[in-house]
Each structure stands twice: as C-alpha cells, then as structure tokens.
Image (tube, rainbow, N blue to C red):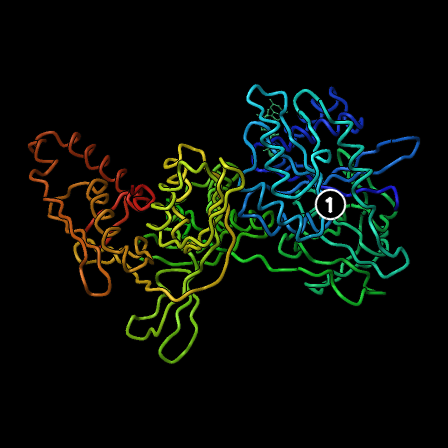
Amino acid sequence: MKNIRNFCIIAHIDHGKSTLADRLLEHTKTINERQMQAQVLDDMDLEREKGITIKSHAIQMDYELNGEKYTLNLIDTPGHVDFSYEVSRALAACEGALLLVDAAQGIQAQTISNLYLALDNDLEIIPVINKIDMDGAMIEVVKDQIIELIGVKEEEILLASGKTGIGIEEILQAIVARIPAPKGEPDAPLQALIFDSVFNSFRGIIAYFRVFNGKIKKGDKVRFVNTGEDYEADEVGILKLGLQARSEVNTGDVGYIITGIKNAKEVKVGDTITLSQNPCKVAIQGFEEVKPMVFAGIFPVVTEDFEELRDCMDKLQLNDASLTFETETSQALGFGFRCGFLGMLHMEIIQERLEREFKQTVITTVPNVSFIAYTTRDEKVIVNNPSEMPDPSKIDRIEEPFIRAQIITSPDYIGNIMTLCLGKRGMLINQSYLTPTRVELIFEMPLAEIVFDFYDKLKSSTRGYASFDYHPLDYRISDIVRMDILLNGDKVDALSALIHRSRAEDFGRKLCLKLKELLPRQQFMIAIQAAVGSKIIARETISAMRKDVTAKCYGGDISRKRKLLEKQKEGKKRMRQIGNVEVPQEAFLAVLKLN
Ligand code: GDP
Ligand code: MG
C-alpha cells in the first residue's frame, strides 16, 4: 500500500488533460504509441458495432523510481459543471491532484472550481503549467496567478508540455514524492467507494471503485450500502488499458466489479460497497442522489412512434442513470415523456444520443427548471411542468432555484458582464482581482435565467474572454407565472412556459412574432395570443389566404387535382392540429430560436 498513489488531473476545459494523460501512459509504458493507436481503432469499431461506450475512467500505471516499484492510479473526471457531483466523487477516491493551467490562457473559472472541489476532498495539489511549448506561453504571469491562488512556493510549480513531452518525468516523480500513499485498514470490513460506472451491453454495468478498507474478492457476496441491495462479485480486477481480472483488489487500490446488474439505476456513484456477511458500520460519507435540474418534454415527431421511443428511452436510461423520465400527455403533441436532466448540456447529449444511436427524431419542448409552489392550504407542489402549476388563485407563494455563478474575465469586460447579469436578475456578491489583469465576479442568479442562452450571451459580450461556472445554491421566493400561447383561442400546452412575471410580456411578444413567421397561412385568419391567466399580454395575426389551392385546377384535370391533395396530405403528417389551426413541427421549437 505504501507504493500506491491515487491521483486525478483537474483543469479548465482544453487546458490539456487528455493529452497529458496520454503522455503519462506512454512514458510509463502502460501503452506504447503503436499499441495505443491500434487499440483506439479496435475500440472504435467495437463501439460502432456494439454500441458500447468506451472511455477510460481510471487506469493503472507501473512506475519505477530509484529501484522502488510504484502503482499509480490515474482517475479521470468528467469535465462539465452538469456532472460536478460525479467529479467530486472521483476526487474523493484520490489523495492528490495535478492541477493543470494552460500557459497561454492562465487560470480560468473551472480551474478554480475544480481546485475548490479538490481542496474540499483534502487532496494534495501539484500545480502544473502546461503547454509551455506554445508561442503565447506566459509562464511568469501564470506562475504568479497560481502562487496567488493556492499559496504555493514558486519551486513547487512544475512546467510541462503534453504535446512535446517536456516535464513528464518530473510530474511522475512529484506524484510519488508529494502525494501521500493511501491509508486504510486491510483487515477491517470492506469499504469501497463507487466513483463511476459504465454500461457494457455484454457484461452489464461495470462499476469502478476505490477500496478504503478491507479487500474485495471474486465471488464475494457484496452489498451496496445506500441502495441496500446484495449482489455477487462475478468478476473483480484492476484497470489497465482494458479490464484485467484479479482474484482480489486490496486496500488503497482502484478496481472494477461486475455483478451482472443491467440497470444503471442500481449502481449509484458515491455509494459504498461492503460485504453482506461482514458489513462496514457506516457508508463512506458524501453520498447524494443526483437531482435533475432542468426539465423538458420529449415527444416523437410521428405520434405512432411513441412505443418505439419508450423503448429507446429505457435503453438510454440503462446507460445513463442520471436521466429521469415519466410519460406525459400533451394535447398538442400526444404521448411523450417529461424528462429531467442535470443541465442543458446533458439535455443536448440525450437528444443527440436519441438521434444518433437510436435513430429517433424527437421534438423537445421548452425547458424549465423545477419550481416549488405552496398552496394557500400550505401544500407543497413540485412543478416540473407548466401543466403542474396549481391554479393561481390557490397559490400562496412560489420558490425558484438560485445558483452561485463565478465568472473570470479581464477587467475591460466588467461593465458588460454587470449589464448582462443584472438583466438576468443577478446580484453581484463579490468582485476580486486575481491579478491586475484578471478579475473574478461572483453573482447569485436564478437558475432559470442561465438555462437558455446565458453562456452564449456571456461569450459574445466578452469576445470569448470570460469563463463561467455555477453551483446550485437554494430556493427563493419569486413571482413566477405560467404563460400560455393560444391559437384562435385554443391553448397549445406544448408552448406554455413558466417565467418570471417581469419577463412574461417581452417573452410573449417575441414568441408570438416568431410563431407568426413559422405558421403557414390558412384559409382563415389565425390569432396568435400570449396570455398569463386570462390576461392577453401579446397578440399577432396571420391573415387568411385568399385562394383555394385547388382552384387552379379548374376541376378539369382530375389526376392533377388528386396529386395536389395527396401532396397536401403528406405535408399534414408533419403538422399537428390545434383546434382548427395546423401547426408545423418547427413551431414547437420556436422558443429556442428566440433572440
Ligand atoms: P482537455 O480538454 O483538458 O482534455 O484538453 P486536450 O488534451 O483535449 O487538449 C486541448 C487542445 O490543446 C488540443 O487541441 C491539444 O492538441 C492541445 N494541447 C494539449 N496539450 C498541449 C501542449 O502541451 N502544447 C500545445 N501546444 N498544445 C496542447
Ligand atoms: Mg479531454
């Protein structure tokens, strides 16, 4: 155990984590260059054929220093804020972290948020300035930033390039010298932390764990403490380039377990594995159920495809336990699913996977966050869907989720960012200079305001010179209303939105205008209205089309007329009927196209 080191690499996106990891694997001869390429190709073929997600979540390297042999476990962390809970569990499996900072970019928002996560888990931090081969490398400036941020000494900062291989040996030596060996009791009851899991269509769920106490053997009866379920350890082993089965995995080490579980929901990141016979007294702390943050409806484009879509959603959930869904009926769109996502990125990934891996074309409705409504009888109603909002006359108050947003930028853009964030109902909580040219702004803001287009707006108002990160904070009382869209007086439920009262009118006006563009003219006039309760807040009109299309045919040429009708029927398939108005699919996505 004294020669084991468990570590992860943390960095802002694109600061070179993956590239550096490749160099470490090469340098320790875990993978040679040729093998690496060959293997990657094999994996991709397999991935294409079998639909297996292949990603190294942890990998073990052998390293020798001064005649001592060391086992280094590199644990990979998901990069995006949507998955920050998983990041924190992966960090909990380590004793140390390489903190990479791009020499040309300097410290960015996720550098800081990842650093805080690592410090929360008491990790030893090894700061590395990466990409020093670049022309724009500002080594001295970035050094100062790092010293300022974590209070290390200058000589503790390593310089590296994942591209050219500079500094790789120094990094490995620092891992051995500075990161503590794992502690733990080999003879105590088993306690292993699940930090990640993957779905393999042949073998079921493969869970990755770090053993804190005791050991786990093939054939053991194991218990997942938080779910309370018992399983048999069909296979355990360590992680090299692939899985390597072993008879046991010991205290301090990182490994995998296969139990034949097929459903990702049964394996929860953060859960503790112990033995059914001799269970540990307490679970490893910090376990949380991941909660969805953003909700939206997903409907099949063709109503008849609902069952097929359900099948695909089930399969997708086997693979991604953080996706939640239940059936939902919409008058406008028929049967579909109300889905919960960890964030907008997660929602995009799910939609993309449905389309790419499952060949489903779907309509996604207006995303919203989860609100809490308290009725006048003091009942608490969780509102994940506009249709769940109680009647306004029965609502005492509504609460909405707030986040803490952290933005790092150049002082030149403070003004623009203030305008943007205050316009999004944000409050500035703190402003501090990391260096004379980098400032960190902390805002508290409603989650609902950053869900749609905040990140794009931030980028455009700072010409890309701002990085952004956020974390959930709490729920606060807020004046939220449901805005409905009516077409010739009929409500289109799939276009309803939950929105702050101060935003409703502007939003309603833009949406009506957009719908006016997207709805085809018909034989009669169409009134498009936005309403809050019974109050109309915006209105547009589409005038009637004058001529009957079939009039051109003079009644003479029957076959031409039939063709025309057939064509119209085809077109109608891609339309949904709301009252007497035909609505094309893209109109349901209008909300996402507002500017
Ligand atoms: P990650 O998002 O942190 O995993 O970053 P990647 O490893 O994917 O690298 C992001 C980009 O930076 C890629 O285009 C890499 O080729 C490039 N890159 C990574 N390391 C270096 C380096 O040391 N020097 C230079 N010049 N480019 C690098
Ligand atoms: Mg990467």
Q: Is residue 565 left or right of residue 304?
A: left
Task: Using the image, determine if residue 323 lies above or below residue 172.
Answer: below
Q: In this rendered view, identify the residue nearer to me: 54 or 336.
A: 54
Q: Who's the residue at 81% across and 32% down the image?
A: 173
Q: In this rendered view, identify the residue nearer to me: 441 or 213.
A: 441
Q: Is residue 593 left or right of residue 62?
A: left
Task: Using the image, determine if residue 225 lies above or below residue 203.
Answer: below
Disc 1 on helix, strand or loop? strand
Dividing the image into 4 quarters, which one contains the C terminus? top left
Q: Position of residue 435 (x, y in %)?
A: 53, 38
Q: Who's the residue at 58% across and 40% down the image?
A: 111
The single residue placed furthest to the front in the displayed view is 436
Q: Position of residue 284 (x, y in %)?
A: 73, 60
Classify residue 516 by image quadrant: top left
Q: Who's the residue at 82% across and 49% down the image?
A: 182
Task: Using the image, determine if residue 557 lies above or below residue 77.
Answer: above
Q: Who's the residue at 74% across and 19% down the image?
A: 34
Q: In this rendered view, identify the residue nearer to me: 216 or 447.
A: 447
Q: Is residue 383 visible?
A: no
Q: Is residue 397 visible?
A: yes
Q: Is residue 14 left or right of residue 421?
A: right
Ligand 1 neighbours mark 1 (CB distance < 8 Å): no
Q: Is residue 206 left or right of residue 425?
A: right
The residue identified by callout 1 is: 124
Q: Position of residue 18 (x, y in %)?
A: 64, 31
Residue type highlighted by circle 1: Glu
The single residue placed furthest to the right in the displayed view is 67
Q: Residues within 10 Å of mark 1 (few under 14, many from 20)?
A: some
Ligand 1 shows up in the quarter that is top right
